[in-house]
Amino acid sequence: MTVRHLFRADRPAHGRTEELLPWYVNGTLDGDERARVEAHLAHCLHCRRELAAQRELQAMLARDEAEVAVGHALARAHARIDRLESRWRPVANGRRVLKGWRRASPWVRAVLLGQLALVLTLGLALVGNRDEAHLYRTLGTSSAPAAPAARLAFVADRGAREDELRAVLVEIGARVVAQRDDEYTVEVAPERSAEALRKLRASAAQGTQ
Amino acid sequence: MHPDPLSLQASRPPDGDAACIRRVADKDRRAFDLLYRGYYRRLTRFLEQVTHRPHLTEEVLNDTMLVVWRKAHTFDGTSRVSTWIFAIAYRKALKAIKRLGESSVAMPEESLGLPSRDPEGEAMVRESRARIGRALEALSPEQRAVVELTYYHGYAYREIAEIVHCPVDTVKTRMFHARRKLKTLLVADSEERA
């Protein structure tokens, strides 16, 4: 070991290379930068030691907690979205309508009022003529509520990419009802369950390739 | 050199996430659920490390995802979806820290542990994590964000500059000072305990 190899901080190239080491460690440097760092590492003991220290630091920081309380947190996010939308949307829409009304010319206002009157008249006529038999439904009625959603459970292949899996789930209109690590339980419309199964299998097959 | 597996997490093509974001912009709750579940673990980890206030994590994460829900239509595809979401999370984290002032609740040491079946090894690992945790505590939230986005989330420095909204040289400088501080603190910590 020599001092010449330990410290080369007097050379600007050394500083520029040393500052890239964290991204050499995480593998995100482009080709030129990577080549420059590797050429420098070949003759700089200081940077090789620094590299080893940084790999150790990365390993230390790479821990991840196993337990995920995503279900509860997501439920709270939905509750906040519900509150947000129920609170602001009618107010915002109301303001927008009022603003539009003020800006509209008199003849546009007259046409809109005429349309409103027509809608109200038709609506009242429909209410007056509706068949009482349609107000309730017996268990034997053919137009019973929609069939319950089909539930599918699967384990995502370890090689499968998370964002691709998400795209497939969006495509088949699936709703995740439970998730634990790679195990998913999803609900899809019954008529789409065969298609959903096919697409999920194809996605898993891609992942293992 | 092969890229570390961690870096692959950040360097995926964004197609799936971009499709999700488009659906979220159309107020599709199922797409939102998928995105939320996909980012939950990464954002939790990132926010824990940046804020060092575990009790804040879920609130800030939900603040972030609420912005995603409301602003998905403004995502223009010039960056990756993950970069966009992490940038929102970073701003929300700094805002939460500022709101609460500098009073910090230290991360409990047990939360820095790694599950292991080897009790002796587990104790050593726990001790190392605790040392790292104490050292990270001494960094500023801005420095912790750069360290975390680099070593754990595997982002390139240019992407980190986008997330934290500053020039790439600032990212490199923050990392340089963070590493120097960590090194000094880790050496001092082991000497103190020797």
Image: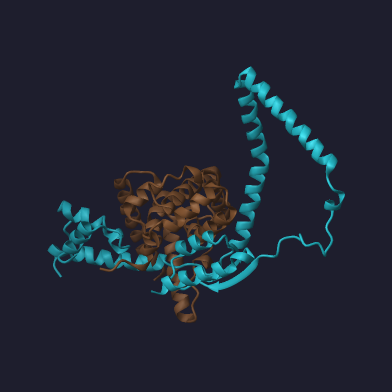
Chain colours: A cyan, B brown
Q: In this view, does A174 lie to the left or right of A17?
A: right
Q: Position of residue A168 (x, y in %)?
A: 50, 63
Q: Residue furthest top?
A: A106
Q: Position of residue A193 (x, y in %)?
A: 59, 68
User: Can residue A171 be seen in this snapshot?
Assistant: yes
Camera-nearest residue between A78 and B171: A78
Q: Is residue A25 left or right of residue A152?
A: left
Camera-nearest residue between B13 and B176: B13
Q: Residue at x 52, y 59 (%)?
A: A171
Q: Which residue is drawn at 55% across and 54% down?
A: B32
Camera-nearest residue between A28 and B175: A28
Q: Where is residue B186 in the image (x, y as percent from the top left)?
A: 37, 63
Q: Is residue A181 left or right of residue B4?
A: right
Q: Position of residue B36 (x, y in %)?
A: 54, 57
Q: Above or below — where is A87 with respect to A8?
A: above
Q: Which residue is drawn at 36% across and 43% down?
A: B166
Q: Residue at x 83, y 64 (%)?
A: A139
User: Can residue B191 be seen in this snapshot?
Assistant: no
